[in-house]
Image (cartoon, rainbow, N blue to C red):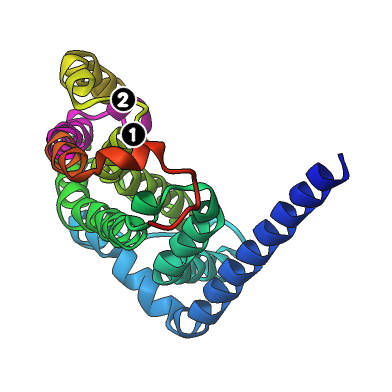
Amino acid sequence: MNEAQESFLSHLIELRTRLVRSLLAVGIAALPTLYFSSELYDILAMPLINSLPQGSHMIATGVITPFLIPMKIAIMAAFLLALPYVLYQGWAFVAPGLYTHEKKLALPLVVSSTVLFAVGMLFCYFIVFRKVFAFIAHFAPKSISVAPDIEAYFNFVLGMFLAFGLAFEVPVVVVVLVITGLVTVEQLREWRGYVVVAIFVVAAVVTPPDVVSQISLALPMCLLYEAGIIFAQMASRRRKPQALAQPPGEEA
């Protein structure tokens, strides 16, 4: 019982160490982003500003909102800069309980997860926002004076970034499920129809109630699911048969 308690405490200490390192990385990355917080906000607001009628502008209804929102954007940017290191810390925490061939996937998974998350956000910023805001502006009555609140806009952008960033992680999730033996490639293919329906349901829930944003999220997720199946099949072929009999943490 003492050994079990010591093992549990050691895992808690290890988890605390990984979390502290991740927070320090975000804090260090926040130094330059806080300095350029106003510029970062202008960049983030550009898609909406470009779609507003001439003479329209954004407003701040809160007393400290003009200060608080740029700070939040700077922190979000700092987290994105530190994301590879944060993902590595998470992988390092679970690595001791993995097989040797699974540990070798650390670098590819960290890199691919970071790249796909960033691609999802860029896709949302450069393509989805432009189409969604243009779609909304087209149907807005001419008698309405548009003046979006910057806090509401930030919450909308953050939610969309998270939705598209996580959606673009679908291939990584599919590959991990296959290489860990939780599902097989054949099962993923059999479930394709159900997955497509689930994707469109998720897209309808996490995106605004307009067809453009829903389709913009659902279609890439469907394509990424198919790409995940292809990569999972390639990864499963490379797995060594004897790896299944190898104890976790044992080196080859």
**Label whose residue precedes the other's in the sequence (2 or 1):** 1
Count of marks overlaid on the render: 2
Q: Image point 29% across, 62% down: which residue? A: 111
Q: Amino acid at mark 2?
A: Val
Q: Position of residue 161 (x, y in %)?
A: 34, 50
Q: Image point 37% across, 58% down: which residue? A: 106
Q: Nearer the viewer, residue 46 or 234?
A: 234
Q: Quadrant of the N terminus?
A: top right
Helix, strand or loop at label 1? It is helix
Position of 226 compared to 69: left or right? left
State the extent of the magenta-drawn residues as a range. 202-228
| Picture disc at residue 237 | none
Question: Measured along the vertical axis of the image, is residue 249 above or below residue 207?
Answer: below
Position of 2 compared to 144: left or right? right
Q: Image point 34% across, 44% down: which residue? A: 166
Disc 1 target residue: 177
In the rendered structure, does residue 187 fall within the stretch colored magenta? no
Q: Nearer the viewer, residue 143 or 133?
A: 133
Residue 147 in sight in this render: no
Q: Amino acid at mark 1?
A: Leu
Q: Quadrant of residue 50?
A: bottom left
| Picture disc at residue 183 | 2
Q: Position of residue 48 (x, y in %)?
A: 26, 56
Helix, strand or loop at label 2? It is loop
Q: Position of residue 225 (x, y in %)?
A: 19, 33
Q: Quadrant of the C terminus?
A: bottom left
- Please tell me how crowded label 2 is: few (under 14), some (14-19), or many (20+) other residues with Cα within 10 Å: some
